[in-house]
Image (cartoon, rainbow, N blue to C red):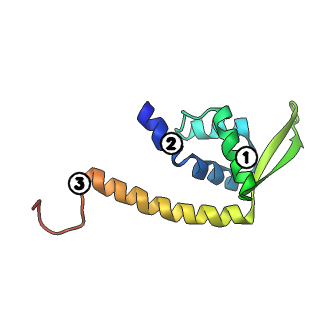
Amino acid sequence: MEHRSQLLKGVLDMCLLALIAEQPSYGYEMVRKLEARGLDLVSEGSIYPMLSRMQHQRLVEGFYEHSPAGPVRKYYRIRHEGEEHLARWREDWTRVATGVEMVLQGEDGSKGGRG
């Protein structure tokens, strides 16, 4: 469990930004969406510092909206800068994930066997 938590810590910002890019969301909703996609180690309290940091970096912006079933909630939507940042992040992630998968599968791209 600890190793899953450490792995997730390195990519959680990217995952949050990707969720926000899909649809403006509030904190609890993001946690539930992450859980539904298999990232169940995230608590609501752990994402707010990240959302605050992303807001400070101008990747997202917060806005308040009345909920039909309850209190006013703070939603986050992606900004243009966030979309550009997410595109670069996706490219980087694809390269890293491909490399990690090759290492785990024992593939090095070279011809022949072990030296």
Task: Tell me the kind of residue under disc 2.
Answer: Leu
The residue that label 2 is drawn on is 8
| Residue 23: percent from left, percent from top | 72, 51
At horizontal 73% and vertical 66% (from top left) the residue drawn is: 80
Upstream in the sequence, badge 1 or badge 2? 2
Residue 106 is labelled as: 3
Q: Tell me whether circle 3 and circle 1 mark residues in contact (CB < 8 Å).
A: no
Other residues around mark 3 within 10 Å, as few (<14) / some (14–19) / many (≥20): few
- SS class, disc 2: helix
| Residue 92: percent from left, percent from top | 49, 63
Residue 108 falls in which quadrant of the image? Answer: bottom left
Measure the C-alpha gap from mark 3 to mark 1.
40 Å
- SS class, disc 1: helix
Name the foreground residue: 18 vs 96.
Answer: 96
| Residue 115: percent from left, percent from top | 9, 62
Measure the C-alpha gap from mark 1 to mark 2.
18 Å
Residue 36 falls in which quadrant of the image? Answer: top right
Task: Tell me the kind of residue under disc 3.
Answer: Gly
| Residue 107: percent from left, percent from top | 24, 59
Name the foreground residue: 43 vs 32.
Answer: 43
- Between circles 1 and 2, the one closer to the viewer is 1
Residue 52 is labelled as: 1
Other residues around mark 2 within 10 Å, as few (<14) / some (14–19) / many (≥20): some
Residue 39 is labelled as: none
Other residues around mark 1 within 10 Å, as few (<14) / some (14–19) / many (≥20): some
Q: Tell me whether circle 1 and circle 2 mark residues in contact (CB < 8 Å).
A: no
Name the foreground residue: 55 vs 43.
Answer: 55
- SS class, disc 3: loop
